[in-house]
Structures are given as structure tokens and as C-alpha cells.
Image (spheres, rainbow, N blue to C red):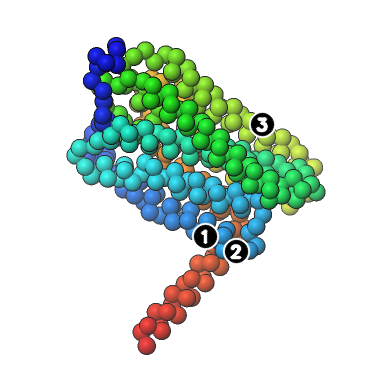
Amino acid sequence: MERENSTVVSEFILLGLTQSQHAQLLVFMLVLVFYFIILPENFLIILTIRSDPGLTAPLYFFLGNLAFLDASYSFIVAPRMLVDFLSEKKIISYRGCITQLFFLHFLGAGEMFLLVVMAFDCYVTICHPLHYSTVMNPRVCYALLLALWLGGFTHSIVQAALILRLPFCGPNQLGNFCDVPQVIKLACTDTFVVELLMVSNSGLLTLLCFLGLLASYAVILCRVKGYSSEGKNKALSTCTTHIITVFLMFGPAIFIYTRPFRAFPADKVVSLFHTVIFPLMNPVIYTLRNQEAKASMKKLLSRHMVFSVYFMVKNTY
């Protein structure tokens, strides 16, 4: 179909997760709980790492950036989704859809690359502890951070560019939000080549990173066999935390992006957890298994509670 003979779509209708009012209310409450309880914990992690001079190791530098990425990622979909749950007419403009799609892949790819960097940091920490300060010096950390941001931007700009070349003339109904698989299906042209490019760009990259991360942690676990019980337990705890996060991040992404873009009943649920629930949990999982970070967070909270009580008493009198 020729673009000039078609009606250009200027907006998309979001169908939502379900048409059932009771199910929508349940999902609304679930998203609201995660958004307003776990999101502040991500900001607390960032504040704790920035305010505690004892948390200067590269691990905490990357953990703070992970919390920032995940908090930013949650602002792309969740607020709009919460509003849409309470709205009868759920509409997003074409430009708004492309913008949402761009930032989803920009921050999502950035987090994926950050997990690879954190795996490298973990490998150097456990397998080459004597060379750690030399290999993971501040200059290297900032260079790795810049590289992952550039990598995420490059990945995302390719995704958006391929979508912008497609003609859209209707239908214009999407699922929960704008993402590459759903938007491609609405194009008024043969999308076989574009789908292959998308799978290569998103799916293959995700799968290779996932397999590479699992292989790296397998190497680490093999190396710690000869360690003392205390060293082995600490290494196992660190690797377990990383592996849980890797599965939470990459499992849904592999399901969504490494297959032909056909609709499955589970797509909407997997997308919800991948974009709203799991990202907020990743930094929390890291922090809950890190004794130094937990102790620092408790000190920060106790200090602020003391100050709050002091000012309340002072204002009272």
C-alpha cells in the first residue's frame, strides 16, 4: 500500500491489560503498590551511596547507576498506565508513542549493558583481587559508564529509525503501551525484513548478553571452589544476587524480542512485569544482600528520623 494513498495514523488507542473492571482494579493496585513502595527504595539507595563516604567502591558506583536507570525506566510506562486504568479513553499520539518506545529501549539497553559491566566487576573482584584497584580505577569506571550510555542510545536510535520508516494507516490499537513488536504489527506494509532487523537488534543482542553473563558467572563459581568457606560463601552470595537479577531482566526480554512478532496471550502480562515490576526490584535485590549497603541505609534513616523528631519537638515548644 502506498503511503500517499493511505490515511496516516496520528494517534494510537491503548487497549490495556484486560477489559475486566475487577482485573483492571487489581492490576492498578499492584502497580501502585510497587510504584510507591519500591520506587522510594531506589531513591534511598542512590541517596545512601552518594552520602556515605564509605561506599566508594566501583560496586556501589554501578549499583547507584542501576537504581537511577531503573527509577528512570519506571517513569516511562507506569505513570501513564496508572492514569489509563482510570480513564475510559486511552489514547497516545504517534509522536508520544515513538518517544515512549525510544526511551524504553534507551534505558533498557543501558541497564542490560550495565549488568554486563557489573558482571565484569564481579569477575575482577573474585578472580583477580590483587589487580582490582588497578583494573577498576575511577577512570575505567567512568569510561564503562559512558560506553553503556552510548550503547543504549545507539541501540534505541536504530529501533526508532526503523519504526519511523513504516507507514501506518490503521488499525491503530495497541496493548498496554508502545513497544516495537506491537507497533510493527500495525504497519500497512510487508514487515518481514523489518522484523528480522528488530530480532537481530534486540533479540540476538539480548540473548548473547544473557548467555555471556551466565558463562561468566559459571567461570566465577568454578574459580571459587578452592576458596575458604568464608570467601566461598561471600562469592556465592554475590553471584546468586547477580544471577537472580539477570534472570529477572533478561528472561522476559528474551521472551518478547527473540521470536517472530506474533501475539501470545502471555505477552501483556510479561510486558507489564518487564517494564514496571522487575526493574524496580533489581537494585533492591542487590542492596538487601549487601551488608554494608544495608547498614549504611539504616544509619541514614535513623539520622533523618532523629532530625525529624528534634525539629518536631522544637517547633512544638
Q: Of the residues shown, which amino acid type is indicated by label 1?
A: Leu
Q: Please, is residue 102 above or below residue 44 in the view?
A: above
- Give the residue at x 74% y 36%: 222
Cβ–Cβ below 8 Å for labels 1 and 2? no
Where does residue 245 sit, x and y in percent of width and height? 55, 41
Which residue shows up at 44% across the image and 52% down it?
A: 38
Task: Please state if 283 lies on the left or on the right of 140 as rendered.
Answer: left
Label 1, on which residue? 47
- Give the side of residue 218 with respect to residue 23, left or right: right
Q: Secondary structure at mark 2?
A: loop
CA–CA distance in space, label 1 to label 2:
8 Å
Horizontal side of 134 relative to 31 (left or right) equals right
Tag 2: residue type?
A: Asp
Name the residue type under label 3: Ala
Residues marked 3 and 1 touching at CB (< 8 Å): no
**Quadrant of residue 86 within the rendered picture:** top left
The mark nearer the N terminus, 3 or 2, is 2
Circle number at residue 215 = 3
Name which quarter of the figure residue 223 lies in.
top right
Which is nearer the N-term, disc 3 or disc 1? 1
Residue under numbered circle 2? 52
